[in-house]
Structures are given as C-alpha cells and as structure tokens.
Image (spheres, rainbow, N blue to C red):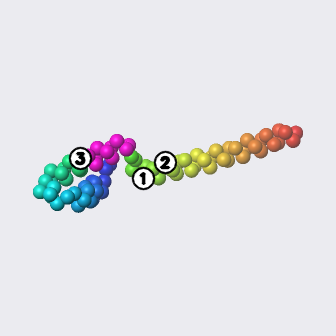
Amino acid sequence: MMDCSAIERLTDKILQALPPSLVALSEDIRELIRDQVKEQLLKLDLVPREEFDTQCAVLARTQAKLNELEQVLADIEATRNSA
C-alpha cells in the first residue's frame, strides 16, 4: 500500500521548485506530478517495511538453523574420522 501523504509531500516539493510563471497551472501540474510519481514508484516494485522486516527475521532464523546443521555435520564427520 502506497503512503499517499509521502506522495503529496513530494509533489509539494516539486511544485515549490517550479518557476512562478507555472503557479497558475499548479493544480493541473500537481495532478500530473502526482500521477507520474505514483507510476514511477509502482515500477520500483517496493515492499512495505513490515514485510521487509519479517523476511529479514525469517532469513536470520534460517541462517541460524543452517549454522546449527553445519555444526552437527562437522561433529558427525569428526566422530566418523576419529573412529
């Protein structure tokens, strides 16, 4: 879900940078800028922060489990080689 307030703030900043001669067209320009910003953000294929954090936690658990299994395998190999 896209944060509309962030898009509005970005649109306002872009409008503030426009020359004064375009201020009369600001509502039309605002709509055009807003649409373009949304379109470009959708192309980025972004994920919400919560989903990113969840995936990071899953990755950390998977890495911990992998390290544990590697240690178990090393212990088994050491036991087999010493026998």
- Viewer-closest of 49 and 72: 49
* Residue in view at x 45 percent, y 50 percent: 52
* Place of residue 79 in the rendered image (x, y in percent of width and height, measured from the top left): 82, 42
Write the start and end of the magenta stretch as one range: 35-45
Query: What residue occupies the far right of the structure in this picture?
Result: 83
Q: Residue 4: where, in percent of width, then height?
A: 27, 54
Q: Dot 3 surroundings within 10 Å: few (below 14), some, or many (20 or more)?
A: some
Alpha-carbon neighbours of circle 1 within 10 Å: few (<14), some, or many (≥20)? Answer: few
Q: Secondary structure at mark 3?
A: helix
**Towards the viewer: 20 or 65:** 20
Q: Position of residue 37 (x, y in %)?
A: 28, 48
Whole-number angstrom distance, CA of label 2 to CA of label 1? 9 Å
Kindly identify which numbered label has been placed on residue 55: 2
CB-based contact (under 8 Å), mark 3 and mark 2: no
Task: Inspect the image, locate mark 1, and give the three-letter code of the amino acid beneath it.
Answer: Glu
Whole-angstrom CA distance, mark 3 to mark 2, is: 30 Å
* Rendering quarter of residue 75: top right
Residue of label 1: 50
What residue lies at 15% left-to-right and 50% top-to-bottom? 28
In the rendered image, is residue 12 in sight? no
Can residue 52 be seen in this snapshot?
A: yes
Q: Amino acid at mark 3?
A: Asp
Residue to which mark 3 is pinned? 35
- Earlier-in-chain disc, 3 versus 2: 3
- Tell me what residue is drawn at x 58 percent, y 46 percent: 62
- 54, 5: nearer the viewer: 5
Which residue sits at x=14%, y=57%? 21
Q: Disc 2, disc 1: CB below 8 Å?
A: no
Residue at disc 1, secondary structure: helix
Mark 2 or 1, nearer chain start: 1
Mark 2 residue type: Gln
